[in-house]
Amino acid sequence: MLALGMKETCGHYLVKHPQRHYGITSPISLEPPREIDYMHTQKLIDAMKPFGVFEDEEELNCRLNVLCKLNTLVKEWIAEVGKNKNLPSSVFSSSGGKILTFGSYRLGVHTKGADIDALCVAPRHVERSDFFLSFFEKLKLQKGIRNLRAVEDAYVPVIKFEFDGIEIDLVFARLTLATISDNLDLRDDSCLRSLDIRCIRSLNGCRVTDEILHLVPNKENFRLTLRAIKLWAKRRGIYSNMLGFLGGVSWAMLVARTCQLYPNALASTLVHKFFLIFSKWEWPNPVLLKQPEESSLNLPVWDPRVNPADRYHLMPIITPAYPQQNSTYNVSSSTRAIMVEEFKYGLVVADEILQGKSDWPKLLEPPNFFQKYKHYIVLTASSPTKGLHLEWVGLVESKIRVLVGNLERNELITIAHVNPQSFPGNREQHEESDCVSMWFLGITFKKVENTESLKIDLTYDIQSFTDTVYRQANNINLLKEGMKIEATHVKKKQLHYYLPADFLQKRKKSVPDAAQRTCRLVLKRTSVDDGSMGSYGCADVATQCTAVPSFSGVARFCSSSFSDETERHAGLPRIMPASREKPIKIIPPLVPVQGLCIPVGPRLDSSLVVAPLPNACSVSMALGQNATASSVAPVLAHSQQQQQDGLASGIIKNSPAHKRGHSPASEECFKRLKDVEKHCLEEAMPVPTFTTLRSQRLSSKELPDSSSPIPASGIRVVKNSIRLTLNR
C-alpha cells in the first residue's frame, strides 16, 4: 500500500515539476523508478521499522506542543528584556522573537526519543548575557523543565534541558534587526552582517539545514534515504563526529549529493548508488552541493587555494551555506580508511539485495569489532561520583581523537580504530571509583620485513593524550580528586577480562566469506612495503625506544587477490597461547606528594598475583618513573614545535600525489557500471586534489602543545611507560 502511494507521489512529482539541474555537475541518470524499485523500497522501510527510526503521531504532536510553548516563552522573555531596558512599549511589544529548529528534526529524519536542536533568534536589544541569565532563570520557573544546564564556554554556547520529556539543545543568535518577524528567512546572507562569531556559528546550523533541503530534487526520497544511511552508519559504528567519523550533517550532505546525481531514483536505488559513489570517490576531493558563492562579508571560508591548512583535510564535505566550512575536519587517516572499507562492504551487500540474493536486514547487521583486531588499547575514565563522571567522561571522549592522531603518527602503527560505543568498567579493579567507563581502540602494527621482532614504545603517544585531557580539565576547573585516565594494551584473547562473553562471540557471516574478505582494509593484507602485524606475538621488552616517532604514510590498499592473501598468511608461523592470559598491570607505590595524585596507568588489584605471560604482551605501566617519559618528551616537544613553526611560515610545500591502487573488490563491484556513468561520476569530482604526505600535514588544533606545562595547581600527573616487543 505504501509502495503504491510512493508510486503515485513520484509520478505526480515528475509530471508537475519539470526537470531541474541540481548540484555542481549534471546528473548521472534521469531514469524513472521501475516497479521493482518500489518493492525494494517498501522492504527497506520494513527493515528499518524495528529500530525505531519512524516516530508515531503521538510523539510528533508532543514535540510540536513543546516547540509552541518554547516559542511563546521566548517572545514573553524578549518583551520583558525590552521593558527592563526602558524601551518604549510600542517597541518591546512588537519586537518579536522566534524559535527555529535545525539538525535531524528540521530535516525530518529524527528518530524516537531523539533531541531537538533549536535556535533562539532575538532582536538587537537582547544580549547574549541576557539569554544565559534572565532566560535561564525563566526556564527554571517553568513547569515541565528538568535537567537544566548551561554550557556557556562551548564552541557554540548552548542551554540544554528536557521539556515535557523532550530533550532540547537551545542556542542563541542576536540579529541587528529591531524586530524579528515570524516569516524570517535566514538563508539571506545579509542577516550575518555585523554579528559576532558566536552568533554566526549559532545561525550556521539553521542555514546549512535549510540550504540542504533546498538543494535536493525530492525531499521525501532524500529523507527516507538519509534515515537508512544514518541507521546503517550507527549500526556499523561509524557515526560520531566527535571521534573522527561523520556526524549527522555530513551524512546528510553525502545523501543529498547522491540525490542530485540520481534525481528520480527511489530510496532503495539511492542507498545502492550512495555506496557506489562514495566507495569510488577519490578523497580528498571535496563533496560540494553547490558552487561556493562570493560575499562581501569577508568571513573565513573553506578554500584550499587560500588557506594552506585546508589542503590537509582528508575527507572534506563542504557545507552549502555561507560561510562554507568543512564539516569533517575531525576525520583522520584511520577513520577515513575504516569508512571507505564500510562503503565498499555496503556496496557488496546492496548489490546482493538488489539481485535478490539477500535482504535489507543484512545491511544493518553490526560488525564484530572485538574479532577484527589482534591488539587493543583499553582507555578507562573513572571518577568518584556520578555527577562528576558525566562531565569527566564527556571531556575524555571529546579528546579521544587526539589519542588516535598520536597513534597514527607513530611510524609503527598502521591503523588506530576507536569503537564509538563506551562500556561500563569493572569496579573491582577501581576500588576508589564509583563510576568507570571504557573505550576500546583496535590497533594494527606495521609489518617490517626481515625482522624477527619489533620494539614499540607507546609512552609518548599515550602520555601526550593524557596530558592534553588533564590540562584541559584544569583550565576549565573540572579536574577533581579521584578523576583518572588509564590506558592498557591487551590482546584479543585477553578482552574477556573487560567485557562480557556476548560481546566477544564471533558472529555468523552475513554475506559470503569471500565477498567480505575482498572488502577488508589493507590492515588484513601484507605487502612488500606495508602490512599488518597479524602474525606477530608479544614479548616483554627491557629497553626503551628513544627514537622520535615519525609520521607514517596513509594506509595503502593492496591489489593482491584473496588467494594470494591466504597463501601469505598460511606461510607465516603462528604462536598459539597455552592458556588465556590476563594483562599485567604493574603499579609501584606512589611517592607521597602534597595535593592530588592522579595515576595515568591502571591500578593493580591487591588480590592479583603478577606472573610472566608466555608469548604474550606484558605492558609495563611504571608510575613514578618520570625519567622514562621525560627523557623523550623534550626531544619530541622541540621537534613538534619546529614543525609547527615551519608550517606557520609556509616552509612546507605540497608533495606529488600518491595514488592508491584499487582492491579487487572495487574493480568487481564497478565492472557492471556503464561507461557513461563512470564518466559522469568522474565529472562529479571536478575540484583538484591536494594530496600530501602525512609528515607534511598541519597538526590539529586539538593536539597538545608539548612545550606547554602540565597543570601545576597542586596536581601531580604521573608519567608512565608503555613498551612492548612484537615477535614473529
Image (cartoon, rainbow, N blue to C red):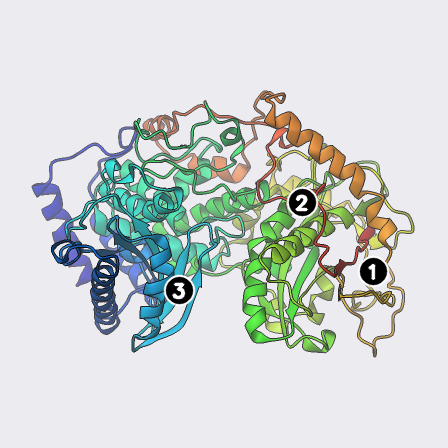
Residue at figure coordinates x 24%, y 66% from the top left: 73
Residue drawn at (50%, 60%) of the image: 366
Q: Relative to 583, is 552 above or below?
A: above
Image-based side of 287 in relation to 644, left or right: left
- Real-space Cα distance between discs 3 and 1? 39 Å
N-terminal label among 3 and 1: 3
Disc ID at residue 160: 3
Task: Report the front residue among 367 and 514.
Answer: 367
- N-terminal label among 2 and 3: 3
Q: Pointer 2: what residue?
A: 406
| Dot label at residue 623 | 1
Residue 506 spot, x, y in % from top left: 60, 65
**Structural distance between the alpha carbons of marks 2 and 3:** 32 Å
Q: Amino acid at mark 2?
A: Asn
Mark 2 Cα shell of 10 Å, populated few (<14), some (14-19), many (≥20): many
Closer mark to the observer between disc 3 and disc 1: 3
From the top left corner, tell me how far across and down residue 394 is, in percent: 54, 61
